[in-house]
Amino acid sequence: MLPETAGHAATFAAVFAALFVAHQVADHWIQTQHQADHKGGPGWPGRLACLAHVTTYTLTALAALLALVLVLALPLDPARVAAGLAVSAFTHYLADRRIPLRRMADAIGKNADWLDHGGGMYALDQSLHYLFLFVAALVIA
């Protein structure tokens, strides 16, 4: 592996780890109960609750990335960071509004009982977030 490629791979690994940890903290600790209860709701109240959650979520991710820069002196390009965080924020908002996620699950034939009562929506939500954390880390690295 070329030294430059190894550097990109190490940057990707560090960025993905930081985004993954930030995701867990933001989704499970920082998100308010109001946001969790209403982010998938109808109309402007639901949209605003989701936007508030995605804002704190994105700020948490930014803090994790800043820690990489400050503590490890990892040279991250601000434009790439902004682009990666935009990917993460936009896709997080779509998934957390629930209707797009449910439509995707229905389109591929996921079992409605599993979705509604077996933890399926949460599992699909989290796996979609992880997919786009991966994409965001590729963009940033």
Image (cartoon, rainbow, N blue to C red):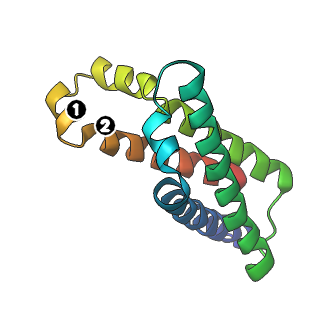
The answer to whether residue 138 of the structure is visible from this angle is no
Q: Position of residue 18 (x, y in %)?
A: 60, 66
Residue 106 lies, with reference to residue 39, above or below; the image says: above
The answer to whether residue 82 of the structure is visible from this angle is yes
Q: Residue drawn 64% across and 41% down?
A: 52
> Disc 1, disc 2: CB below 8 Å?
yes
Front-lying residue, 138 or 60: 60
Q: Position of residue 61 (x, y in %)?
A: 65, 58
Element type at mark 1: helix
- Whole-number angstrom distance, CA of label 1 to CA of label 2: 7 Å
Label 1 crowd bin: few (<14), some (14–19), many (20+), radius 10 Å: few
As drawn, the label of residue 116 is 1
Quarter in which the N terminus is drawn: bottom right
Where residue 5 sits, quadrant-wise, is bottom right
Front-lying residue, 128 or 57: 57
Residue 111 lies, with reference to residue 118, above or below; the image says: above
Q: Position of residue 118 (x, y in %)?
A: 17, 41
As drawn, the label of residue 121 is 2
Name the amino acid, label 2.
Answer: Met
Name the amino acid, label 1.
Answer: Asp
